[in-house]
Image (spheres, helix red, strand yellow):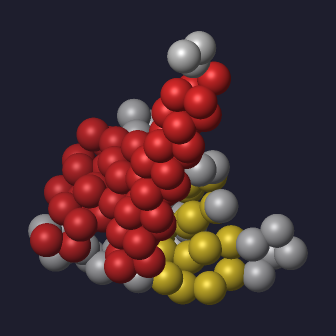
Amino acid sequence: MELLVYLKDDAKKMKHILLIRKYDQQPFSHFQKRIEEGKPVLLFSGYDIEELEKLYCLLVNLQENGATICIQEKFEDGKRIEIGLEIIANLIERGYEISRQLQDYDDHVLAEEEPK
């Protein structure tokens, strides 16, 4: 999974960049330039649910502070679709549910393997 996060250039851009830098330590000028050029300010790639949750919290925080964000999911064929925060929340919930199910399965298998 690959997510691209765009941030609209506005008067609060500096405040938004400070929030973003708590998540990603790139130089201030890096984010400023990407916002001004209309390029993604953040890229998320992979299936690390804990990292996705951190990104989600940042995005919620940005929106609460007045930022206009656009999140796109990029597919292997290069196509992109815009998604909302609710999709990311669902991905996180689903990821944790799968982890719980795998843990339950592992516990069950181990219990069956124990000598009686």
Q: Which of 51 and 41 is in front in this view?
A: 51
- Residue 3 higher or lower than 49, as above or below: below
Q: In this view, does 71 lie to the left or right of 46?
A: left
- Quarter of the image where the C terminus is located: top right
Q: Which of 87 and 14 is in front in this view?
A: 87
Q: Mark yes or no: residue 27 visible.
A: no
- Residue 72 higher or lower than 109, as above or below: below
Picture quarter containing residue 10? bottom left
**Which residue ends up furthest to the top in the rendered image?**
115
Q: Mark yes or no: residue 109 visible.
A: yes
Q: How many labels does the image show?
A: 0
- Residue 72 higher or lower than 53, as above or below: below
Q: Residue at x 59, y 50 (%)?
A: 47
Residue 26 pos. (x, y %): 44, 37
**Which residue ends up furthest to the left in the rendered image?**
65
Q: Which residue is drawn at 23% across and 50% down?
A: 19
**Which residue ends up furthest to the front in the rendered image?**
116
Picture quarter containing residue 40? bottom right
- Residue 102 higher or lower than 38, as above or below: above
Q: Nearer the viewer, residue 102 or 88?
A: 102
Q: Which residue is drawn at 40% across and 43% down?
A: 50
Q: In this view, does 55 lie to the left or right of 64?
A: right
Q: In this view, does 65 lie to the left or right of 72?
A: left
Q: Residue at x 81, y 75 (%)?
A: 78
Residue 102 pos. (x, y %): 55, 45
Residue 1 pos. (x, y %): 65, 61
**Which residue ends up furthest to the right in the rendered image?**
77
Residue 99 pos. (x, y %): 49, 47
